[in-house]
Image: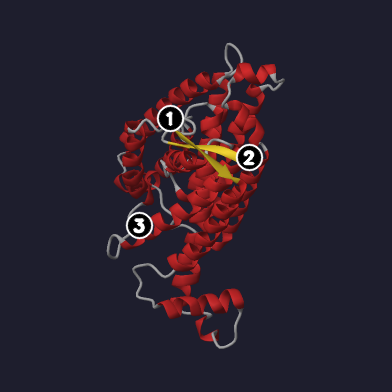
Amino acid sequence: MSRKGKNNGETRVVTTLEFTIVMVVLLVLLLLSILTSITFGNADISVKEVYSVLANEILHLKGFENYSQGSIHDVVWIIRFPRVILAIAIGIGLSVCGVVMQAVVKNPLADPYVLGISSGASMGATLAILFGVGSGIFGGIFGSSFVGVMAFIGAMVTSFGVLFISNIGGTSNAGKLILSGMAVSAVCSAFTNFATYIAHNQNATLSITFWTMGSLASADWDDVLIILALMIAGTFVFWSQYRNLNLMLLGDETAVVLGTDLSKLRNKYLILSSLLIAVAVYSAGTIGFVGLVIPHAVRMFYGTDHKRLIPLCALVGAIFLIWADVACRIILQNAELPIGILISMIGAPCFIYLMASRSYGFGGER
């Protein structure tokens, strides 16, 4: 079996063997990225000490008991390693949701935030930070995480709002979803800016700014494994729907002829994507461009078949975010650059290049 992939308008055959080899290579690169990225950071810890901690914690090897506690153990096992796992989870979630969103709205320039989900999450976090909204409800249960919970709620409410508006006056379609998302995003951004303006709280404003810039610094073992499991589960769900996602690229008229109601599927996929994005925003703040650039980069080489596109994007997104987080930890001495800033610096030029080269269509059509 083979699949036609497109690169800058030229058609070539992507064989099943090639796809399998690429998947194996990406899995190996992911493992090497995990093991290597843990050795980077501002703390002066040798590679030997890093792997001694891992040998004690993961393999439980004898002779490494001295690394079961202490500052070196805490930096490697409690700070760095959870960040790497969280980077994998967020990279998978944003990349896969980007693929799905682009199919749902049939717009190759869409990403997980085009439907206003990011703005809704930011509004929820802003209300929590500035006015303590949610602290009374969630404070006793979630502690300081109530800000993240409010961001999660904001993202979900926004996504349902977009669905509701897009279904007013008839069945929802790709165009109405985009317009509804833009309208809801504008409203959420306006309320966020208004709340920030009237609060006159400089410390809270700095917290909001840091939240909207994105960071993996809050990663801990209590959450990262659950978040990773959710992202992987969502990826497998979307992977099982590759035929319907492929059908969405052909349009509603073709789907009707084939007996498939895309409007209902579109709503279901949007809800699940919103759930995954809300989890990502809850754990790492707002990180843009991942869901836009990664699907394009993979699609340009391996075509539009979601059966291959989804797993490839998941692995590439995970590897990309691991090294983006490493760069954020080492670029500034004794400080951390918010990952959203760095990815925007990388993503914006890539986006401009895609536009300039006209390689932004599905599969790279000119």
Q: Residue at x 67, y 17 (%)?
A: 256
CA gap between label 2 and label 3 equals 31 Å
Instruction: Give the total number of marks visible in the rendering.
Output: 3
Q: Relative to residue 190, is residue 301 drawn left or right?
A: right
- C-beta proximity under 8 Å, tags 1 and 3: no
CA gap between label 2 and label 1 equals 28 Å
Q: Tell me the residue that label 3 is attached to.
A: 328
The kind of residue tagged 1 is Cys
Front-lying residue, 306 or 178: 306
Labels 2, 1: front one: 2
Q: Tell me the residue that label 1 is attached to.
A: 188
Front-lying residue, 56 or 306: 306
Label 2 vs 3, first from the N-terminus: 2
Q: Tell me the residue that label 2 is attached to.
A: 238
Indicate the position of residue 96 as horizontal and vertical percent values.
54, 42
- C-beta proximity under 8 Å, tags 2 and 1: no
The kind of residue tagged 2 is Phe
Q: Residue at x 46, y 20 (%)?
A: 179
The kind of residue tagged 3 is Cys
Indicate the position of residue 42 as horizontal and vertical percent values.
34, 68
Q: Relative to residue 44, is residue 137 drawn left or right?
A: right
Front-lying residue, 353 or 106: 353
